[in-house]
Amino acid sequence: MEEDLDCPLCMEEMDITDRHLKPCHCGYQICVWCWHQVMENAAKENTEGRCPACRTPYDKDKVVGTRLSCSELEFTASKRKSHKAKSKTQEGRKHLSNVRVVQRNLVYIVGFPVNFADEEMLERRDFFGQYGKILKVAVSRQHSHNGPTASVYVTFVRDDDAVKCINAIDGCIFEGKLLRACFGTNKYCNSWLKNLPCNNPDCLYLHDEGPDEDSYTKEEMIAKYGKYVSILTIFRLH
Ligand SMILES: [Zn+2]
Ligand SMILES: [Zn+2]
Ligand SMILES: [Zn+2]
């Protein structure tokens, strides 16, 4: 069974079509919808859409490794887009389902060596535990042309400890791998979005509306940053 894979730009789970989209030789994958946004924004400005990870221009005609042609991709993307746009007009908190909030006690680390990607070990005081009390460590593994690496999400009790951790980790070399660290983003709890009580005591999704300055829709994220920087660089401290 394949592991769940989230699009690094919009944090949505990648479906089959998304997984088949291999837009760049560097191995960095984004979902069809985000790929379409990158290309569309670039076209508007008469520039080339580029891979958010390695900045190589995307070649529309040679999307690496997809079984679908580009016109099919665009069709899928526009279909999904109108589907997502519609949900905005629905009642209640529904409009927030598309919103991501920067979570200032959550550290997101990429490029982690996979043989060290063990939740229990990383929580210990000789690893991320040294920066402060940890609520949760989560790990997801990816395959890139550099071989397997992992992304690590560390949720601290205190925001200050997350800042300490980012300052210490970002840009350092660990076991020969360059680590990148920044604040993570979170989304709203599904029950909360439906105005229902959340019955999961371990639920780490948001149950309060986040501050405006930390809230972004996926469209805003990509319109603002998609062309030039990856999400990893957006919330980096330095
Ligand atoms: Zn995406
Ligand atoms: Zn690339
Ligand atoms: Zn919840």
Image: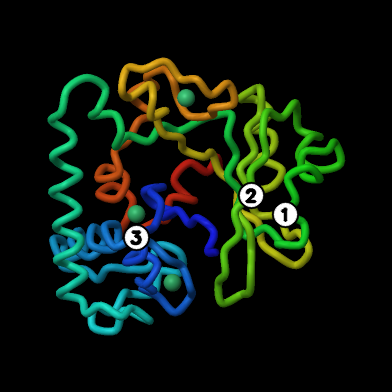
Q: Which residue is disc 3 drawn over?
A: 31
How far is disc 2 from disc 3 in space, using C-alphas?
Answer: 20 Å
Q: Residue at x 31, y 74 (%)?
A: 58
The percent coordinates of residue 169 (x first, y second) are 69, 47
Marks 1 and 2 close (CB-CB < 8 Å)? yes
Left or right of residue 182: residue 223: left
Marks 1 and 3, the one that precedes in the sequence:
3
Q: Residue at x 13, y 39 (%)?
A: 86
The percent coordinates of residue 216 (x first, y second) are 32, 35
Q: Which residue is disc 1 drawn over?
A: 117
Marks 1 and 2, the one that precedes in the sequence:
1
On whether ligand 1 comes within 8 Å of the CB at mark 3, the answer is yes
Marks 2 and 3, the one that precedes in the sequence:
3
Left or right of residue 156: residue 175: right
Q: Which residue is disc 2 drawn over?
A: 139
On whether ligand 2 comes within 8 Å of the CB at mark 1, the answer is no
